[in-house]
Amino acid sequence: MVKTHNIRDIYFVLSTDNQIIVDALGNQDFSGIGKLNYFYNNITKHKKQSEILSHKGNPKFSVLSHYLNIKIKELQLELNNLLEHPVKIQGKIYDRQNDLFRAIYSNLICLEKYHLN
């Protein structure tokens, strides 16, 4: 579809009140459902990392940004193998309360391991 319609821009959009994300960051009532347990574990890990790395800002927004950055990288890798032209892929987070879309933290760094030199 991207190739057929010559699509040059793609946006991933995730709402701050998405029930799966809210549950993953909260009680994790759905953690026993299929692959959600793996997803929930990753979200929990990144939530803890963002709380450690950043004392200001919104840790939920950081976690959502990190998740969307992963999805953007995955899609970019797939598209690079299929297309001759570059496709710009971005992420937005929708805040339903304020009815606004905010760009994700695209330069967000979440470390898998910490190293001291």
Image (cartoon, grey):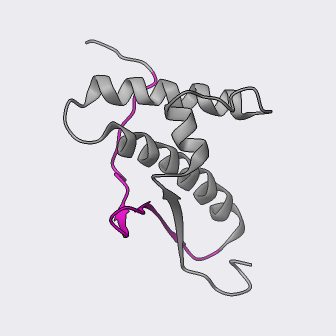
Q: Residue at x 34, y 43 (%)?
A: 108
Q: Residue at x 28, y 12 (%)?
A: 116
Q: What quarter of the picture does the C terminus occupy? A: top left
Residue farthest to the bottom?
5
Image quadrant where residue 10 sits: bottom right
Residue 56 coordinates in the image, percent (x, y): 19, 36
Residue 14 coordinates in the image, percent (x, y): 51, 57
Residue 79 is a magenta residue: no
Task: Left or right? Give the position of 99 relative to 53.
Answer: right
Which of the two residues, 67 or 20, is positioned nearer the viewer here? 20
Task: Left or right? Give the position of 31 relative to 107.
Answer: right
Residue 59 coordinates in the image, percent (x, y): 33, 37
Count of marks overlaid on the render: 0
Which of the two residues, 101 or 68, is positioned nearer the viewer here? 101
Residue farthest to the top?
116
Is residue 48 placed above or below 104 in the rendered structure? above
Q: Residue at x 38, y 25 (%)?
A: 49
Residue farthest to the left?
56
Residue 68 coordinates in the image, percent (x, y): 51, 51
Image quadrant where residue 3 sits: bottom right
Task: Left or right? Give the position of 99 relative to 87.
Answer: left
Is residue 5 placed above or below 71 in the rendered structure? below
Residue 111 is a magenta residue: yes
Q: What quarter of the picture does the N terminus occupy? A: bottom right
Q: Identify the magenta region.
A: 84-112
Is residue 11 placed above or below 56 in the rendered structure? below
Which of the two residues, 42 or 98, is positioned nearer the viewer here? 98
